Image (cartoon, grey):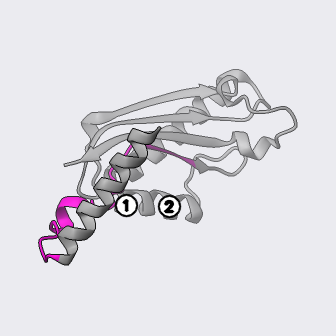
Amino acid sequence: MRFVILAATAAAIAGLSACASGRAPARESIVAAPTDCRSQTFEVYFADGEARLTETARQVIGLTATQLQGCDIQRVQVIGLADASGAASLNQTLSQRRATAVAEALAAAGWPTPVFEVAAAGGQGATVAPGVAEPLRRRTEVIVTAAPL
């Protein structure tokens, strides 16, 4: 424990003496610029029985696309979901249409389409915590793997 305290004190003194002597390291060498080029997940919600993007959905997609401009987008998983009501085959088709709508909007925003994986999980994939309202199940999950260039 004493060694750690002594080492920390020595480092602080060395840093202060470098500043006092005018030999401080360049800011760029010790402070990294923040970057939004990181992996992230976001969701796009839909109206009941709809696969058409709402204005809010377009804004979410646009903001995320802008945020990741200039990044190396390595993989984009787009997973369409539906609520549990209705026939399973209809929910599967609706989920696919939702995922396709989101993928097309991201491609139109300039994202590289070769990295897209579009899937649909229907009502089965939309399981959430008990008591969660059905509208929260009507969504598309987008999982983005990105890194700085």
Mark 1 crowd level (few <14, some 14–19, many ≥20, 10 Å Cα): few
Magenta part mainly helix, strand or loop? loop
- 26 or 79, nearer to the observer: 26
Q: Position of residue 8 (x, y in %)?
A: 37, 51
Which element type, helix, strand or loop, lies under badge 2? Answer: helix
**Residue 118 place in picture, x, y as percent:** 43, 32
Under mark 2, the amino acid is: Arg
**Could you tell me which residue is drawn at 25 percent across and 44 percent down?**
112
Q: Amino acid at mark 1?
A: Gln
Would you name the residue on which mark 2 appears?
A: 58
Circle 1 SS class: helix
CA gap, disc 1 and disc 2:
14 Å
Q: Residue furthest right?
A: 131
Q: Position of residue 145 (x, y in %)?
A: 36, 38
Q: Residue at x 27, y 59 (%)?
A: 32
**Dot label at residue 67:** 1
Crowd tier of the residue under label 2, counting other residues whose Cα lies within 10 Å: few below 14, some 14–19, many 20 or above? some
- Provide the residue span drawn in magenta: 21-43
Q: Quadrant of residue 144 in the image?
A: top left
The disc at residue 1 is none
Query: Residue 92 colored magenta?
Result: no
Where is 126 relative to 38, above or below?
Answer: above
Q: Is residue 143 left or right of residue 31?
A: right
Q: Earlier in the sequence, mark 1 or mark 2?
A: 2
Q: Nearer the viewer, residue 73 or 135?
A: 73
Q: What residue lies at 29% left-to-right and 35% top-to-bottom?
A: 115
Vertical relation: 87 (above or below) 41:
above
Front-most of residues 119 and 10: 10
- Identified at 50% across, 61% down, the residue is 58
User: Which residue is nearer to you in this view: 31 or 145?
Assistant: 31
28 within the magenta span? yes
Residue 24 visible in this rendered orientation of the protein? yes
